[in-house]
Image (cartoon, helix red, strand yellow):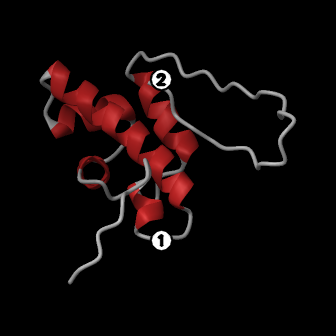
């Protein structure tokens, strides 16, 4: 019998991939980029030009291949689409738990 485990909110962590938190951040940013491109009805060529990317790089990104994309580059793409990207750093709480990086859309 196959054991079934309840997943977390991070599929990359569930798959025990290294840098799971970073992959989740990139996935959420890339999803927002793709959502915006589709909503505008742009072709990949039009979107790539607006984002300062090549069409093949954009195609890879929209298919979930984040290699070669930093979080900063993805945030720059969102800014080129007109989004306001704010980075907020909060003081640590009283617990001994490590901090985290999250994307709030």
The mark nearer the N terminus, 1 or 2, is: 1
Which residue is depicted at the point 54% across and 45% down?
71
Instruction: Bin the neighbour count of mark 1 within 10 Å (Cα to Cα): few under 14, some 14-19, many 20 and up.
Output: few
Measuring from the top left, give residue 93's x and y in whole percent.
83, 33
Which residue is depicted at the point 51% across and 60% down?
20
| Nearest to the observer: residue 76 or residue 50 | 76
Measuring from the top left, give residue 12's x and y in whole percent.
43, 61
| Nearest to the observer: residue 32 or residue 77 | 32
**Residue furthest toward the front?**
1
Cα–Cα gap, marks 1 and 2: 31 Å
Residue 33, placed above or below residue 66: above
Which residue is depicted at the point 36% across and 43% down?
53
Measuring from the top left, give residue 85's x and y in whole percent.
55, 22
From the viewer's perspective, tell me whether residue 76 is left or right of residue 50.
right
**Residue furthest toward the bottom?**
1
From the viewer's perspective, tell me whether residue 28 is left or right of residue 84.
left
- Which image quarter: residue 31? top left
In this orientation, does residue 67 appear? Answer: no
* Total residue callouts: 2
Q: Quadrant of the N terminus?
A: bottom left
Q: Which residue is mark 2?
A: 79
Which residue is depicted at the point 23% across and 50% down?
59
Q: Quadrant of the C terminus?
A: top left
In this orientation, does residue 14 appear? Answer: yes
* 1 vs 2, front mark: 1
Q: Which residue is mark 1?
A: 16
């Amino acid at each position: 019998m196959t054991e079934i485990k309840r997943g977390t909110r991070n599929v990359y962590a569930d798959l025990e991939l290294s840098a799971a938190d970073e992959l989740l951040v990139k996935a959420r940013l890339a999803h927002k980029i793709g959502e915006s491109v589709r909503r505008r009805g742009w072709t990949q060529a039009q979107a790539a030009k607006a984002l300062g990317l090549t069409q093949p790089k954009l195609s890879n990104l929209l298919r979930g291949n984040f290699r070669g994309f930093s979080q900063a580059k993805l945030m720059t793409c969102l800014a080129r689409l007109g989004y306001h990207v704010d980075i907020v750093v909060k003081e640590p709480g009283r617990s001994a738990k490590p901090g985290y990086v999250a994307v709030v859309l």
